[in-house]
Amino acid sequence: MKKVLVANRGEIAIRIIKACKELGIETVAVYSEADKESLHIMLADESYKIGEGSPAKSYLNMDNIIEVAKLTKCDAIHPGYGFLSESIKFRQLCEDEHLNFIGPSIENLICMGDKLQAKSIAKEAKVPVVFGCDTSIENVEELKSILKDMEFPIIMKASSGGGGKGIKVCCSLEEAVEKFSIIKKEAEISFGDDGVYLEQYIPRFKHIEVQILGDKHGNYVHLGERLCSIQRNMQKIIEESPAPFLDENLRSDICEAAVRLARKVGYVGVGTVEFIYDYQNQKYYFMEMNTRIQVEHPVTEMVFGFDLVKEQIKVADGEKLKVTQSDLNTSGHAIECRINAENADLGFRPCVGKISLFIPPTGSPDIRVDTFIYSGYKIPPYYDSMLGKIIAHGRDREEAIKKMEVALKSTVIQGVETTLPFLEKILRDDVYRNGDYDNTYVARMLHMGEYGLSM
């Protein structure tokens, strides 16, 4: 692999470009009109505009991206996360044009992208799954029939959903009937597939995900787990590794289950197997598998001292894993805080505008900042509101929290409102500091009144 096109933007594009440079691989950046002053353009060896500001006309424009890759004689395309990273159509286009897609196979994307199929495969791999229906629901009558055997609350999901989209929780038959047509329309618009299924909803749980890595030679390892329960609207805010509440037996069970699933589907590349942990009943259940690098991958890198993006590129290039499970050991604790251009007081309303001053936290070898912003950067209105991530590493969780507190207080972002004050509030809270939080933590905090009454 000599030359890679990075089909993304923001901090993940920068992360990939830096990894490629360390491997001696040339990079080509693509950008939209709205991103013409973006940092990833300046870091790549070459850069090409592929369309207007909206994602549909730029970062989702498959034909333009493929054309640039061919024009610049690239060997491979790295999709990052979001956008085209889990697109079966784009993966096929890359294959048709003899471009190495740095990600899993088409078969992996198909079987894990369909949540019902993934659930079925998890059962075959003897990975626990939440009780629910095994096929898509076609109409309201079928919905009512299935609900006769289930208790409320239930959760309704788009079969091809992901990223927290296409999900509704229902507490009554009437609510389920009302939301059924809504979620089918949302699923069709967002994913091109109106398939919907049901599962028993566990109101309070811990969200655990396991990082796995597989090569083309049948070798697999896991890199521990991350706790991702601090969420709003099912979007993560803070992640940490290792999960503070897991004992070694449960940790081993969950991580081995993730590897079993990866082995079952012959998974190639980096991936994340996500689980719900019902701590009241002390049971865990498979939720989904993300077939890409994750936003929160740095916490795993910090505790394992392992570059996931470089390994992802090597594996895509046909290399064997250089490590076995026994080679991988954790060191300390890591926490990641996502910084968004949002007003927490106004229901996390997105903010756009010019960043008049940006000063990142400096002076500590245990603080990592992944971002694409700089003083004078104008935030475009077309994309996700995340400005970057701060990752802190400590000898233990207490030290990691203290280092993160200092890092957040040392970060200066002027010109737009951000979630920095909200993140600081969480880190000061006793519930968070004790590690005794679940998926309802942010919602309950918001209902206290300081940051509004709704998510």
Image (cartoon, helix red, strand yellow):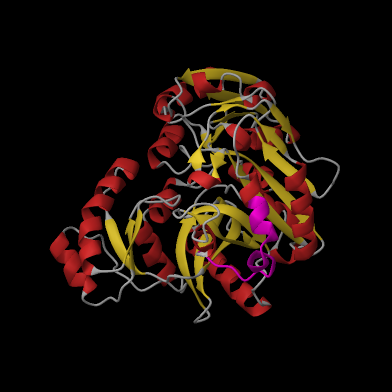
Name the one closer to the observer, 35 or 350.
Answer: 350
Residue 312 in the image: state x and y as whole percent. 62, 45
Q: Residue furthest bottom?
A: 281
Name the one closer to the observer, 120 or 196.
Answer: 196
User: Is the residue 163 above or below the residue 132 in the image?
Assistant: above
Residue 10 in the image: state x and y as whole percent. 59, 33
Residue 422 in the image: state x and y as whole percent. 61, 50
Indicate left or right for 133 with 88 as reference. Answer: left
Image quadrant in which you'd find residue 287: bottom left
Residue 180 in the image: state x and y as whole percent. 23, 57
Q: Residue at x 24, y 77 (%)?
A: 149
Residue 430 belongs to magenta span? yes
Image quadrant in which you'd find residue 429: bottom right
Stretch in magenta = 423-439
Name the one closer to the observer, 251 or 123.
Answer: 251
Indicate left or right for 390 with 128 as reference. Answer: right
Q: Residue furthest front?
A: 449
Residue 294 belongs to magenta span? no
Q: Residue at x 54, y 46 (%)?
A: 344
Number of numbered tags placed on the structure image = 0
Q: Is residue 323 visible?
A: yes
Q: Residue at x 62, y 56 (%)?
A: 239
Image quadrant in which you'd find residue 39: top right
Name the one closer to the observer, 199 or 347.
Answer: 347
User: Is the residue 67 above or below the residue 127 in the image?
Assistant: above
Q: Residue at x 42, y 55 (%)?
A: 112
Q: Quadrant of the N terminus?
A: top right
